[in-house]
Image (cartoon, grey):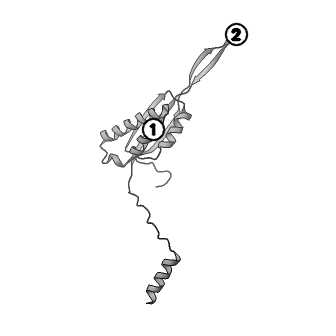
Amino acid sequence: MKNNQLIPSASHAKLSFVGVSPFRARLVADLVRGKTLEEASRLLILENKKAAKIIYKLLKSATSNAEQKGVADIERLYVSELRVDEGPRIKRWMSRSQGRTDQRLTRTSHITMKLAEKTGAKKAPAKAKKSTKASAKKSEKGSEG
């Protein structure tokens, strides 16, 4: 597939204005990107972060969208794209000493997930036999006699 071609997605889900920092959400997103549904859900359940719980719910939503769309084989789906963009910053003011105030920025995220179906099954590479001196000598004796 060429770089400029789009990956045909089986389904997608989007979550906007999530109350988690994009940097923290990207740490979790990097774990899941490119994984199968089963592997991704296992990783997200075990991850002890706020963003993991949010992305897990988004994964479930994208999976149910794929089922509604009528994808032939749900088990062949994988996370083809998982993008975490920065949303608007919520600006709040906090009182400080001597009548001053400080600005507090609460960062938000927009998370987009696309699932695609794997097209071909990859075959495991065949293991090459290690050639040793003893096996080489046996083969020589067998060919001579």
Q: Residue sitting at 45 percent across and 38 percent down?
A: 46
Q: Is residue 126 left or right of residue 66?
A: right
Q: Position of residue 74 (x, y in %)?
A: 33, 45
Question: Disc 2 designates what residue?
Answer: 98
Place residue 127 in its image quadrant. Answer: bottom left
Between residue 3 and residue 53, name the one nearer to us: 53
* Mark 2 or 1, nearer chain start: 1
Q: Residue sitting at 48 percent across and 77 percent down?
A: 135
Kind of residue at badge 1: Leu
- In the rendered image, which quarter contains the C terminus? bottom left
Q: Is residue 113 left or right of residue 68?
A: right
Q: Secondary structure at mark 1?
A: helix
Q: Secondary structure at mark 2?
A: helix
Between residue 81 and residue 58, name the one nearer to us: 58
- State the CA–CA distance, disc 2 to disc 1: 46 Å
Q: Position of residue 90 (x, y in %)?
A: 55, 22
Against 113, is 105 above or below? above
Disc 1 residue crowd, few under 14, some 14–19, many 20+, Cα 10 Å: few
Disc 2 residue crowd, few under 14, some 14–19, many 20+, Cα 10 Å: few
Question: Disc 1 designates what residue?
Answer: 46
Q: Residue sitting at 33 percent across and 38 percent down?
A: 64
Against 9, is 2 above or below? below
Between residue 49 and residue 82, name the one nearer to us: 49
Q: Which mark is residue 82?
A: none
Kind of residue at badge 2: Gln
Against 6, is 61 above or below? above
Against 80, is 20 above or below? above
Q: Residue furthest right?
A: 98
